[in-house]
Image: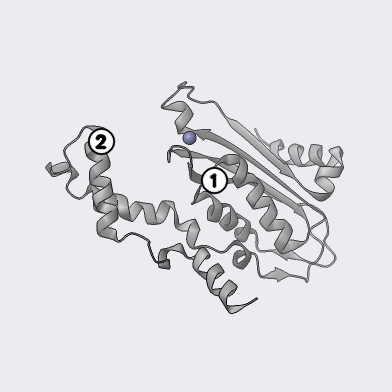
Amino acid sequence: MSDVVKSLSTRLSTPVDKPGVPSREEAEAAVRTLLRWAGDDPTREGLQDTPKRVAKAFKEFYSGYGEDPSEILDKIFAEVEGYDDIVLVRDIPFYSHCEHHMVPFFGVAHVAYYPTKGVVGLSKLARLVDAYARRLQTQETMTSQIAKAMVDALEPRGVAVMIEAEHMCMSMRGIQKAGALTLTTQFTGIFKEDPAEQVRFLTLVRGGRG
Ligand SMILES: [Zn+2]
């Protein structure tokens, strides 16, 4: 990788250091503008510290921009006594924001893969989900981004990702359908080629529940 490309990719993965990123003062001023846009008075007592809190909360909501998914999955444990069957982590809770309205959507992710060269720590898969959830995107792109990161890092025989989420932009605004669940799946490799593998994945995701 050339130095130029390297420094560019470093900057892209850590946008907080990018020139042109607004200062905290600018971010807080933008929140005051939105408070006025909502019809409130940002100078009233209850709202005085709100811009500061919102700017801080944004750092947490969107901390995924500072995470490099390939780094999260870079440690692979090869000593697994030949284990090559499915590894499934289900019900990974996540909170995200849709890129269309910056309104929360949240739910659970189920991720599975068939290892070839080894396995990753199970908590790393949950961290991977978080790295993408804490950005702005759609549920569809998040689903395929998680699958792609696993394919790239693990070179598995197949990856299955399923996300079930409720979108507040659907519950609170527009058609106001509270409780509607959006389900997305992405299958690669053996899961894509063999419908029986998809059934196995879905059975394990749904199985053993009271
Ligand atoms: Zn939305």
Residue ID at (12%, 41%):
44
> Which of the labelled discs sits on residue 37, or is there none?
2
Residue at the spot 43% in from the left edge and 41% down from the top edge: 102
User: Type of residue at label 2?
Assistant: Trp
Residue placed furthest toward the bottom: 3
**Apparent side of residue 152 relative to residue 195 in the rendered image (left or right):** left
**Which type of secondary structure does the marked residue at label 2 adopt?**
helix
Badge 1 marks a residue whose secondary structure is strand
| Residue at figure coordinates x 70%, y 63% from the top left | 153
The N terminus lies in quadrant: bottom right
Q: What is the three-letter code of the residue carrying label 1? A: Pro
Q: Residue at x 44, y 53 (%)?
A: 62
In the visual, does 102 lie left or right of 116? Answer: left
Q: Residue 149: percent from the left, percent from the top?
A: 67, 57
Give residue 194's position: percent from left, percent from top: 87, 42
| Mark 1 surroundings: few (<14), some (14-19) or many (≥20) residues within 10 A | some
x then y, percent, for residue 24: 28, 59
Where's residue 178, x and y in %?
A: 47, 24
- In the image, residue 50 above or below residue 36: below
Label 1: which residue?
93
Spatial distance from mark 2 to mark 1, Cα to Cα? Answer: 33 Å
Tell me the quarter of the image containing the C terminus: top right
